[in-house]
Amino acid sequence: MTEEVTRNSGIGAIGNINWGTHFCQFYNTKQDLVDIIIPYLKAGLENNEFCIWVASNPLEAKKTFKMFVSNPETYLEKGQIEIIHYDDWYLKRGFFDTQEILNGLMEKLNKALANGYEGLRLFEGLFSLEEEYRDDFAEYEREINRVIDNSHMLVLCTYFLRKYNAAAIFNIIERHQFALIKRKGKWEKIRNSR
């Protein structure tokens, strides 16, 4: 495992986290999503981390980023954040290839470190994850845990709660170190028991 260096998650319900952390958020509304992803990305940018936002709608993501982050153009112009379309990240060759995605992620990390960033912070918005790719994505998540455990990398995956049944939610939590879910208007951290 990489050295235990804590990073500011930007998220009050979590606090500081170590490199190699892979967690998820379940959300019901766009505001729920913004409540978590914007502070998460801002903390990364402010702490000299390279950030990647994988989005189903990059134009909307960029608009949201510009709306909620101070001096967004500074980060965009210097290339400290990339907002990438879901298909360009996961389906580069028209199909889901876990190894290709992980290789691309490690290339991004190595480039970020070579450019003087302290690490990489990835946000994967999974609203558009098609049913046909869910098993492939589950395998990818199991593999990413192995890969990031020894890396200067943080990964946040978000899931639209209404798209998943109880068994699927359990399986998702099982693939992450912990999950965030809003109960009674407050974000709570649910640890994976494994």
Image (cartoon, rainbow, N blue to C red):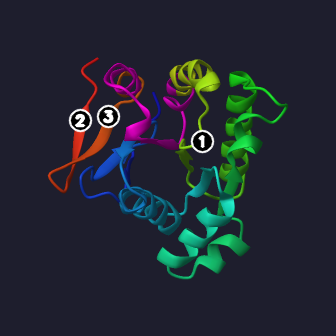
Instruction: Report the Cα–Cα distance between label 1 and label 2.
Output: 24 Å
Task: Name the residue nearer the viewer: 142 or 18.
Answer: 142
Residue 55 in sight from this viewpoint: yes
Task: Looking at this view, name the residue that lies furthest to the right.
Answer: 93
Which residue does the image show at 54% across and 41% down from the upper left? 126
Q: Is residue 39 above or below residue 114?
A: below
Marks 1 and 2: which is nearer the front? 1
- Residue type at the position of mark 1: Ser
Which residue does the image show at 38% across and 63% down from the upper left? 31
Q: Quadrant of the N terminus?
A: top left
Cβ atoms at labels 3 and 2 below 8 Å apart: yes
Residue 44 locus on image (x, y percent): 49, 60
Residue 21 numbered mark, or none: none
Task: Name the residue nearer the viewer: 105 or 94.
Answer: 94
Secondary structure category for the residue under label 3? strand
Cβ atoms at labels 1 and 2 below 8 Å apart: no
Q: Is residue 39 above or below residue 191?
A: below
Provide the residue designation for mark 1.
128
Provide the residue designation for mark 2.
190
